[in-house]
Amino acid sequence: MSHTKVRLTISLSREAARFLKALQAQAKSPSMSALIEGIVAGLKSGQELEQLHTKTSAYYDALSAAAISEDAAWGQLGEAALGLDQPETVQSEARHTETQSGAMNQQKKPDSVPAER
């Protein structure tokens, strides 16, 4: 990646120039160039994200029924291994039980050690 800068000269309407100057002040950008670089980076990132979304959708749209079925089976296996296949109420009850048993273990500790006779 090159850090060499290229000078561009552009002409904008007064309204567009005022908007960019106000945006520069609002963003506390050190220069108009830095502001434009940020805008371009954001646009580029958005475009790359959209391309990724398009490619991902095309990939999944092209999967065969057998591949979709296999992916679903792997997903179910993963959910079962993580306990995510249980209804939320069962998961909540399990967390509640674990919390209670942890609290009870702390309560069982004696406050003081009995004196020896």
Image (spheres, rainbow, N blue to C red):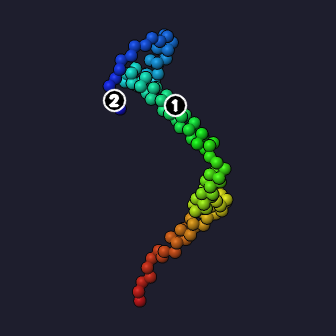
Q: Kindly identify which numbered label has been placed on residue 47.
A: 1
Image height check: is 88 above or below 100? above
Residue 4: horizontal and vertical position, in percent?
Answer: 32, 25
Image height check: is 80 above or below 65? below
Q: Residues within 10 Å of mark 2 (few under 14, many from 20)?
A: few
Near-viewer residue (23 or 85): 85
Number of on-image labels: 2
Quadrant where the N terminus lies? top left
Q: Kindly identify which numbered label has been placed on residue 2.
A: 2
- Indicate which disc, 1 or 2, sits on the residue closer to the N terminus: 2
Q: What residue is shown at x 47% (from left), y 22% (from top)?
A: 23
Measured in 3D between alpha carbons, the distance from the residue under mark 1 to the one under mark 2, in whole angstroms, is: 21 Å
Near-viewer residue (2 or 90): 2
Q: What residue is shown at x 64% (from left), y 48% (from top)?
A: 64
Q: Is residue 105 left or right of residue 25?
A: right
Image height check: is 36 above or below 101? above
Residue 42: horizontal and vertical position, in percent?
Answer: 47, 30
Quadrant where the C terminus lies? bottom left
- The amino acid pointed to by label 1 is Gln
Image height check: is 51 above or below 39? below
Q: What residue is shown at x 62% (from left), y 51% (from top)?
A: 67
Q: Look at the numbered disc 1 and give the secondary structure of its residue.
A: helix
Q: What residue is shown at x 62% (from left), y 43% (from top)?
A: 62
Residue 50: horizontal and vertical position, in percent?
Answer: 55, 34
Q: Residues within 10 Å of mark 1 (few under 14, many from 20)?
A: few
- The amino acid pointed to by label 2 is Ser
Identify the residue at the far bottom of this view. Answer: 117
Residue 65 in view here: yes
Q: Is residue 54 left or right of residue 22?
A: right
Near-viewer residue (93 or 12): 12
Q: Quadrant of residue 41?
A: top left
